[in-house]
Image (cartoon, rainbow, N blue to C red):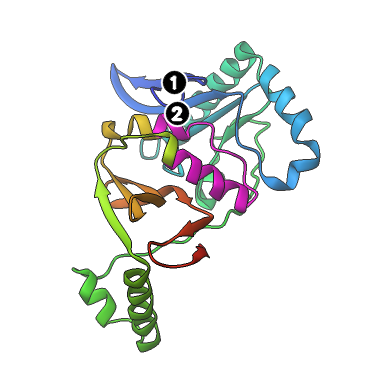
Amino acid sequence: ERVMTDCKPIYILAYQDKRLIGRAALWGIRNEPLPKYVSRWRGILEAFLRRHPLLVCRSPFSSFHGIILPDPPVQDEVLEMLGQAAIKEIRRLGGSFLIFDYLENKQMEWIGWPPGFSPISLYFPNTVLTLQWETFEEYLAKNKWRMRQHYKRSSRSATELGIRITRHDSVDDLDAPLALIRNMERRHESAPNPWARGMLDNMSMVEHTWLEAHIGGQLVGCMLLLEENGVQIAVLPGLAEDVVSPGARPFHI
């Protein structure tokens, strides 16, 4: 809520004999980043959502759904009750679409969904690394020779260019990393993240690691790592465009 100050939070709770057994965390969103394939209609869609917001059930920033259900046999009944309550909320909000996103295939097939819901599959690029090593050195040792050589070459190049990576708990100057983040978004033609500044300003509320890359005194790269339940999620990558390395000619990152 501190980050998404322009979105309306709605929490629907399900109780059984005064015991909390399920919940749905929903957000009324008027500025959802739109994928680039709607660029032709972006202006029309953005104006429409400002008037008729989305109501989305999700855990923001973690790429995870926002619904928690009890185990069978009451699972389907609770899901139907939460869904019906969410339908009432979107009508009260004057919204356009009610979305339960980041669901797995088996969750979309639950029989408790109220009538009218339709499963839609959207594919977004992502990369997942399952950790099987105790240390980074063990990770390198158990990888292929070609990968180890690539890492050595990259490390030598970084040393020659004077690139230094540091870890931090906070950001001193938000404008500098935001400029790199916006540059990365433009490079990949992705919609600007409307909550980037709020995420950087409130990262201390959750487990996190802030990474910065410098050449001399210049910030040339950044990334925020969010951590919970043994999972680490990389968000807000930022990269400079053209950099002048001390004692070297300008180069392109």
**Residue that appears at 66% across and 44% down:** 35
Residue 210 image point, x, y percent: 31, 46
Q: Quadrant of the N terminus?
A: top left
Discs 1/2, front: 1
Report the magenta stretch's main SS.
Answer: helix
Judge whether 153 appears above or below 113 on screen: below
Judge whether 8 appears above or below 217 on screen: above
**Residue that appears at 56% across and 16% down:** 89
Residue, disc 1: 12
Judge whether 29 appears above or below 126 on screen: above
Observer-nearest residue: 128 or 223? 223
Q: Give the range drawn in magenta.
A: 177-199
Residue 94 image point, x, y percent: 66, 14
In the picture, measured across the screen, residue 206 lies left or right of residue 67, that is left
In the picture, measured across the screen, residue 240 lies left or right of residue 146, that is right
Query: Is residue 109 in sight in this rendering?
Result: no
Q: Does the magenta stretch include residue 244?
A: no
Residue 32: which numbered mark, if any? none
Observer-nearest residue: 103 or 141? 141
**Residue that appears at 65% across and 49% down:** 189
Residue, disc 2: 78
Which residue is most to the front? 247
Query: Is residue 13 in sight in this rendering?
Result: yes
Q: Is mark 2 on a helix, strand or loop?
A: helix
